[in-house]
């Protein structure tokens, strides 16, 4: 599940404070701030897992819980932006853009700001 989550780079780059824990109900809880709505990320992950050939999946449309190999994963979005707004939001810092060696500007890059370079 976390490999599928890591493969959704655009969605994950927009999330802040990503955390996960095993709940008392034996379900894995994944929570983040900003980024996509929980049901949007559930749909992305379901597509990714289905494309990888995994058959043991359960999901109800509009719900933010996925069952992968019999293990429930509950997705929680705190103050989400949504995929559409996230992709069109100006000024959203994206790691892929900051590390792109072909993207040259005279402005300092975010990682240069962080490192004081």
Image (cartoon, helix red, strand yellow):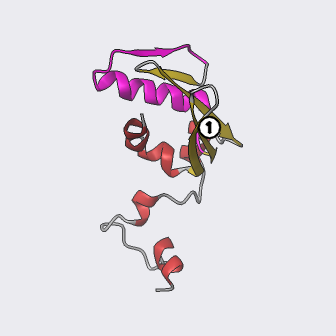
Tally of marks: 1
Residue 105: quadrant of the picture:
bottom left
Q: Is residue 114 above or below residue 66?
A: below
User: Which residues lie in the magenta part?
Assistant: 35-62
Would you say 79 lies left or right of 44 here? right
- The furthest residue to the left: 53
Q: Does the magenta segment cover residue 39?
A: yes
Would you say 47 lies left or right of 22 here? left
Q: Is residue 111 above or below residue 24?
A: below
Would you say 109 lies left or right of 76 here? left
On the image, the x and y values in percent for residue 106 come to 44, 80
On the image, the x and y values in percent for residue 102 come to 30, 66
Q: For the point 35% across and 21% down, which residue is it?
A: 50
Q: Which residue is mark 1?
A: 82
User: Which structural element holds mark 1?
Assistant: loop
Q: Does the magenta segment cover residue 53?
A: yes
Residue in front for this viewpoint, 74 or 83: 74
Q: Could you tell me if residue 6 is visible in this image? A: yes
Residue in front for this viewpoint, 11 or 65: 65
Q: For the point 56% across and 29% down, which residue is it?
A: 40
- The furthest residue to the right: 79
On the image, the x and y values in percent for residue 57 come to 42, 16
Q: Is residue 94 above or below residue 18?
A: below
Q: For the point 40% across and 24% down, which residue is it?
A: 47
Q: Is residue 31 above or below residue 44?
A: below
Q: Where's the N terminus, which quadrant?
A: top left
């Amino acid at each position: 599940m976390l490999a599928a989550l890591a493969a959704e780079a655009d969605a994950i780059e927009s999330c802040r404070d990503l955390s996960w824990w095993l709940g008392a109900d034996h379900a894995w809880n994944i929570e983040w701030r900003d980024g996509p709505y929980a049901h949007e990320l559930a749909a992305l992950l379901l597509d990714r897992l289905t494309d990888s050939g995994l058959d043991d999946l359960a999901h109800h449309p509009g719900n933010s819980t996925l069952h992968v190999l019999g293990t429930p994963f509950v997705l929680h979005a705190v103050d989400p932006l949504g995929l559409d707004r996230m992709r069109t939001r100006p000024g959203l810092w994206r790691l892929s853009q900051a590390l792109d060696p072909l993207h040259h500007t005279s402005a300092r890059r975010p990682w240069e700001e962080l490192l004081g370079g």
